Amino acid sequence: QVQLVESGGGQVQAGGSLRLSCAASGGTFRNFAMGWFRQAPGKEREFVAGINWSGSTTNYGDSAKGRFIVSIDSPKSTVYLHLNTLKPEDTAVYYCAAKYIDSNEYHYWGQGTQVTVSS
């Protein structure tokens, strides 16, 4: 059973940085792609960033471009999301997700980690 566990959220002032981690277990992940999503209160879930298991391909949502970086440590089965130059509008619950590489839908989700950015 695939399990994803996020960590690293917290409260930070605007302009600050955080690093989120997602520890994956229970699957053959070389056939997976990983993603980060976020959801703020009253808003729809939003794609933030994605990466394949080898780390050779990344993609970003508009809100993340130029400020966030997704990376992966495949031997440790851990995906990271580096949040830089944070803004109050980045406040949300951030979720890690996994999907088969040829699928359009993410099948597995973590429980989420809260990021709060104060002005």
Image (spheres, helix red, strand yellow):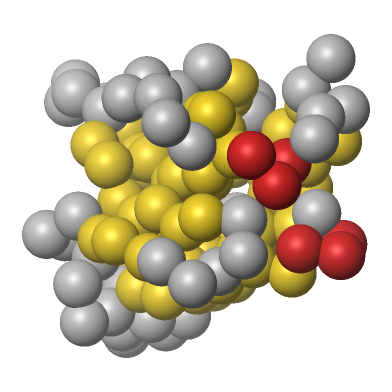
Residue at the farthest left position? 62
Residue 4, position as x, y percentages in the image? 72, 33
Say which of 51 and 90 sits in front. 51
| Direction from residue 43 to residue 21 in the image, left or right | right
The answer to whether residue 99 is above or below residue 9 is above
**Residue drawn 51% across the image and 55% down it:** 52
**Residue drawn 87% across the image and 62% down it:** 76
Task: Tell me where residue 39 sits by quadrant.
Answer: top left
The answer to whether residue 53 is above or below residue 55 is above
Residue 47, position as x, y percentages in the image? 27, 42
Q: Quadrant of the C terminus?
A: bottom left
Can the viewer see residue 10? no
Number of on-image labels: 0
Task: Tell me where residue 69 sits by quadrant.
Answer: bottom left
Residue 20, position as x, y percentages in the image? 60, 61
Say which of 55 and 78 sits in front. 55
**Residue drawn 19% across the image and 23% down it:** 44
**Residue drawn 70% across the image and 47% down it:** 30
Residue 3, position as x, y percentages in the image? 78, 26
The answer to whether residue 65 is above or below residue 117 is below
Q: In which quarter of the image is the N terminus?
A: top right
Can the viewer see residue 98? yes
| Direction from residue 8 to residue 47 in the image, left or right | left
| Direction from residue 87 to residue 80 in the image, left or right | right
Task: Tell me where residue 87 sits by quadrant.
Answer: bottom left
